[in-house]
Amino acid sequence: MKELELKYGCNPNQKPSRIFMTEGELPLTVLNGRPGYINFLDALNSWQLVKELKEATGLPAAASFKHVSPAGAAVGLPLSDTLKKIYWVEDAPLPLTPIACAYARARGADRMSSYGDFIALSDECDEATARLINREVSDGVIAPSYSPKALEVLKAKRKGTYNVIQIDPSYRPEPIERKQVFGITFEQGRNEVNLADPALFENIPTKNKKFPEDKKRDLIIALITLKYTQSNSVCYVKDGQAIGIGAGQQSRIHCTRLAGQKADIWWMRQHPKVMNLPFVEGIRRADRDNTIDLYIGPEREDVLKDGAWQQFFTTRPEPLTEEETREWLAKNTGVCLGSDAFFPFGDNVERAHKSGVEYIAQAGGSVRDDHVIMTCDKYNIAMAFTGIRLFHH
């Protein structure tokens, strides 16, 4: 198949719409549903991300995409009991396989942003993963293959309309890529930079020069995630998964703040008060996620005031105090941070430190590198200058 006609483009008024190959056949097959223009943008970007994560780490990988940027990305490390609970998979119908763990991590990091996502899996989608996907609000999934039982589960999702795409894992695109804007064709070489290259961690200008192997892995995950995230972007990673992604911001500090806020929410979800919230029986997963975000944040009264809490809880929970929040956030340590370009000022490091960042990988090259280095040294943060910019548009 050389081309596939689509219902419409980014918006319903943008017709006609299609994806096509100028040479050869499309390297994908639609097994179910009718993916749209944005679905394919998410699918193809997310597939590149998980494929590269798998190649770099040797672990199964998954990503959750929304509007051509990842809401979450992760490799298939086992889940602790705490993570199983905050990701709503403690009652999983089947034992969690490595690819299912990767998906649970990718989906669970920022559940608010992942609502209605497009999923990418580096490995075959097995039944355990399909059954997790089946419980979530999602637009579709792309993977190199599907087990017969997994395909059966996914084809029944969303009244039979769920989008299931199979990608040829051996497909390699041409080294030159093109796109049109306002009738003008842009052309550039594909970004084939190797982000698993050990040389990325050779230029360490900070006093702390120690990068444990698991932290290098997490920084590589951050950088590969950023490679497929709309710029400007910053990514916080811990224990094999992105925990906060700030995408498409005009200011670097706004990226760092946004991603840091998401990382803080991820950590606060593990607070005993949050994990033991007395939810009413039968509350929808999306409502539960939204309620938790409100309970954690400054708008907690929206779910705690009289007349409101009864909709969500069996009894009114005690709010988190500022002291409890501050003490819990201080326990989040060993976080890694990647940036798709240099930090212009030390304020980014100051904000990152508040969310437990102890390791940083960024391009370097700012006229204020000295200030950034000095701020890292202030907190004993190890920072590598990669010399690589990862803008994605």
Image (tube, rainbow, N blue to C red):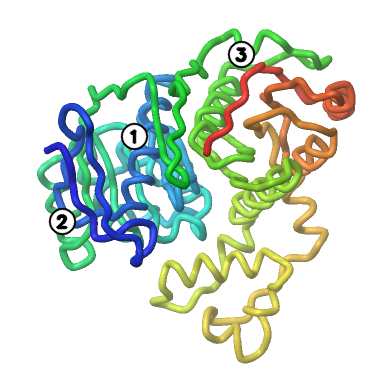
Give the residue type that dot 2 points to: Lys
For marks 3 and 2, give the CA distance. 43 Å
- Give me the disc on residue 155: 2
Which residue position holds label 3?
200
Q: Is residue 67 left or right of residue 307?
A: left
Question: Which label's residue is closer to the chain start, 3 or 2?
Answer: 2
Q: Is residue 51 left or right of residue 331?
A: left
Q: Residues within 10 Å of mark 1 (few under 14, many from 20)?
A: many
**CB under 8 Å between discs 3 and 2:** no
For marks 2 and 1, give the CA distance. 22 Å
Q: Residue 149: x percent and y percent?
A: 12, 47
Q: Residues within 10 Å of mark 3 (few under 14, many from 20)?
A: many
Which residue position holds label 1?
98
**CB under 8 Å between discs 3 and 1:** no
Identify the residue at horizontal 63%, vertical 51% (top origin). Answer: 262
Examine the rendering and report whether any part of residue 120 can be seen.
yes
Viewer-closest of 25 and 265: 25
